[in-house]
Image (cartoon, rainbow, N blue to C red):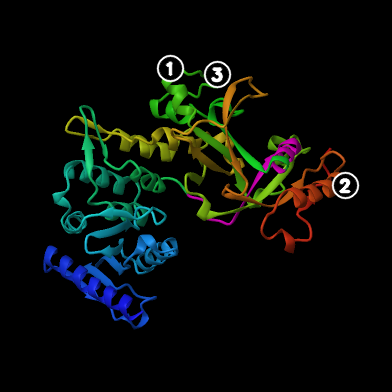
Amino acid sequence: MDKKRSRSQELETIIYQQFREKLSEEFDIFVEQRLDSRMRADIAISKEDKKLAIIEIKPNLFNRPDKSDIERHVTDLAYNGQFRYAIIAVDEHTLMLKDCYLNKRDEFKRMTLETICHAFEVIRNPSLVPGIEYREAVFGLLRELIPGEKAQAFCEKNRATVMMRDEDSFYFDDENLEDELFDCFLKKFEGEKICRYTSLSSLYRTINEGKQSMCCIVGMNDRSECTYADNYMRGKQIENNSTYKTPYEVEVENKFFILSCMDAEKYDDLTMWRLYGDNTRGVNILYNVNKEGLNGFKLYYIDYAEADGRHLTLDKIKNLMALKVDERTFRMRKWDEWKHFFKPYEYRDEKEIRLLYNRKNEQAHLWILTSDYQIVCPLMIFGLDKFPLIIDEVKLGPNCPDIVVNQLQVEMMMREKLQIPGWKKKENIVKTSGIGTYR
């Protein structure tokens, strides 16, 4: 034990000296007391009032069975202490870094001392980063379009991001920053429970197979799903019978899969039963949202147009995408993904919360022929143990066939086929609608 402690202390001194030599005196580097090392990082780096990074000394990290636990602990130290970067020093030449501002769930990446110190200098002086004229134009307009803390925080956090350009456009070098940008325009679901109306046969397949399918956006029953936002941005009317004109358009849309859900306040709503619950013969599934399992998924409220047809959020995005600097136009490379969170005013009463999955280069798991429109459409299929929505309970619709028998049978089937944490403590996981007046 003493030998290990001696090696850690030796490495801590070396790492401190390396950073002290590379960084200017404007940076403060603190070596923490080791009396409560589980609560404090070994080394902390700051610049004036900006907390930049913590460094934890972990020799032989790659050979330790608790490597994942150590990485989570170091991430939490940085995140809870409001430091942007978490760094693990494995030896004199091996530094592992994570940017907790961009994504707390990202993996640690090996980086050189020179690269890390350059990043710190860039944060101190954003004018060193390429694309300052484009960056200032985008952030300036964004602050005008969305006054308040959300846009201000985005601009401040990314004030040193690199901007790239081509012949006609300019854009963020890291396209994942667009996910943060759309957070300024859309409302992320932060609650605990959501629900989804569907048919009894759909619920049966889910229970029997232990899997949840997500349908490609092309196969949705609303034919304007894929075209509404694009048409609005182009100043066109909604084309209910629109078709794709190029193989590229079809290929792009085939990457996106959705599951349409609602807030739990709509759990027993007659209008929703009629529209989406097989005309009251279906079921409504109540889910617990596993936020840790949302990596790769997006879960946001749909943004709706106004009664007069104006779509205020799309108008703001349209202004941003029309921004010109040096004869180049700002381009959002993830627009084809985010455009699926906008719908016309007529659907406002749904209060839809949409789960979206982008398969990127992943192969579709299955192809089907949709029953409504006879469209050949890909599906993505997930095991329930890997899906971010965990079934909490089920409600049978007012006119569900043989509702008394099915309530008992579905309950028994679910308990026998599925192993869901928390069900053992619930007396009933299948309930019936409280609406008794509909025929």
Rendered image quadrant of residue 12: bottom left
Rendered image quadrant of residue 229: top left
Name the kind of residue labelled 2 in the image.
Val
Which quadrant: the C terminus? Answer: top right
Q: Residues within 10 Å of mark 3 (few under 14, many from 20)?
A: few
Q: Residues within 10 Å of mark 1 (few under 14, many from 20)?
A: few
Coordinates of residue 64 in the picture (x, y in percent): 40, 64
Kindly identify the residue that appears in the image at 78 percent across and 57 percent down.
428
Coordinates of residue 272 in the picture (x, y in percent): 69, 40
Note whether residue 317 is visible: yes
Q: Nearer the viewer, residue 61 or 325?
A: 61
Which quadrant: the N terminus? Answer: bottom left
Instruction: Using the image, tell me which numbered label, if any, was put on residue 156.
Output: none
Q: Is residue 427 left or right of residue 421?
A: right
Name the kind of residue labelled 1 in the image.
Thr
Name the kind of residue labelled 3 in the image.
Asn
Q: Which residues are magenta?
A: 188-207
Please give the residue where the numbered disc 1 appears in the rendered image.
246
Please give the residue where the numbered disc 2 appears in the rendered image.
404
CA gap, disc 1 and disc 3: 16 Å
Note whether residue 305 is visible: no
Kindly identify the residue that appears in the image at 21 percent across and 34 percent down.
165
- Residue 179 against residue 29 in the figure, above or below: above
Please give the residue where the numbered disc 3 appears in the rendered image.
241
Question: Quick check: is 195 in the magenta stretch?
Answer: yes
Kindly identify the residue that appears in the image at 76 percent across and 38 percent down.
200
Question: Quick check: is 416 in the magenta stretch?
Answer: no
Secondary structure beneath label 1: loop
